[in-house]
Amino acid sequence: MTPHSLVPITDIKPGAELAEALRDAGGALLRPAGYVLAEADLENLQRRGIEAIAIVTPRDPAEDSRLREAARARVLHIFRHSAEAPEAQALLHAVLAFRQEHFR
Amino acid sequence: MTHPSLAEMIARLHKLPAMPAVAMELLSSLSDDNTEVDALARRIAQDQAIAARVLRVANSPFYGLQTQVGSIRDAIVVLGFSSVRSLVLTATVVSGLPAGRCPGFSQEHFWRHGLAVGVAARNLARALGHKGDNLFIAGLLHDIGRLAMVVVAPDDYARVIATAHEQDCPWQQAEMSAFGYDHADVGAALAQRWNFPEDIRQALAFHHAPSGGTPGGPAGLIHYADAIAKALDLDGAEDTQLPHLDPATIDALDLDQHTLARVLAETQEGFDHCSLLLG
């Protein structure tokens, strides 16, 4: 999952990316998820009375590496009695790849 | 320490809460093509708590429906009877079969694991070109014998859990040491008592020893789905460990790495959505 946080619109700089679609009170789409906000967008949205927006937070490589290591350690704990068993190898490698990629 | 024998355990199964009537009807519809879907839909809709949970899942983004479904009948039209049957059966057994009190046993972990194995089994079955609905239900219920042991002999089972924890061994192994039989034996007896379809009975009886079931049958799929659910950590239990895998069964499934990776991703996603059924 992409890390994101709800940030007051006055603190957002041009170039920030929307973490989720932005809709008005009636549910109409204003900007799609992934849209990169320009200066004019921020002024426009402020005029519409929008106070805070969910924007994508840049990933921290050190934090990612810590999460990947935690996922790996957890998988090896679950496989603690079967990490060497030939019949468990395919599942071990697939689940290591999946959980390290998704930080789960 | 004397534990109830398998015969005594089976004789005491009447202590279990009755399988909810709607769940029994849904299970018998698995092997009956003449099920009256309309009548069953009306019966399901009468239990508003169950219907509400099922509709919450049916309307989740997972199914990507264009319009919201507002009734069980609509859900059957849009998702199909077999999908709705799986959802209703899950919501019904999870709330209808309470475990009582057994120190160390978590009903939440138990049903999270059952649901995870159901989702994994359905995805495995589809990846291998089989129909997945019976497999989902077989996965959901595969450990039901354990729930029976917990209800019938809570103090004995609490010691099984404590021993498994001390020795860091699978619960199934500790059951065997203490009782001389395991939850798969009890599950097979329950399946007979409750008239489960044969493929579900086989899955309950042989998921730890799939060579005892029909070759290429449901027990082998549930055997691997059990391991997939544990590897993905979906039950939420701290001391999870991979169950022993049967090499011949894993060979016979013949899954390539690409397909296995896809099954893992689909299982994680399917579980995240279906876990709304757990309340």
Image (cartoon, coloured by chain):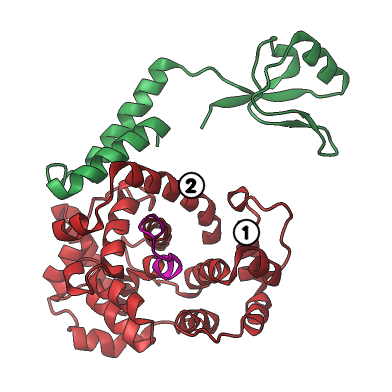
Chain colours: A green, B red
Tell whether B218 sits left or right of A59. Answer: left
Query: Looking at the image, do the residues carrying marks 1 and 2 touch, with CB atoms under 8 Å apart?
Result: no
Seen in the picture, residue B183 relative to B118 is either above or below; the reply is below
Q: Which residue: 48% across, 68% down?
A: B94
* SS for callout 1: helix
Q: On the image, which quarter does residue B34 sit in?
A: bottom right
Seen in the picture, residue B191 relative to B204 is either above or below; the reply is below
> Residue lying farthest front?
B129
Q: Chain of mark 2?
A: B
Where residue B213 appears, x then y in whole percent? 22, 74
Where residue A56 appears, x then y in whole percent? 59, 22
Look at the image and give the residue range highlighted in magenta: B126-137
Where residue B56 appears, x then y in whole percent? 64, 58
Q: Which residue: 37% across, 85% down?
A: B15
Tell whether B84 sits left or right of B230. Answer: right
Seen in the picture, residue A83 relative to B148 is either above or below; the reply is above
Q: Nearer the viewer, residue B274 or B163?
A: B274
Decide which of tag 1 and tag 2 comes sooner along the chain.
Answer: 1
Q: Which residue: 50% across, 82% down?
A: B29
Q: Amino acid at mark 1?
A: Ala
Q: Which residue is mark 1?
A: B58
Where residue B75 appears, x then y in whole percent? 66, 66
Q: Which residue is mark 2?
A: B269
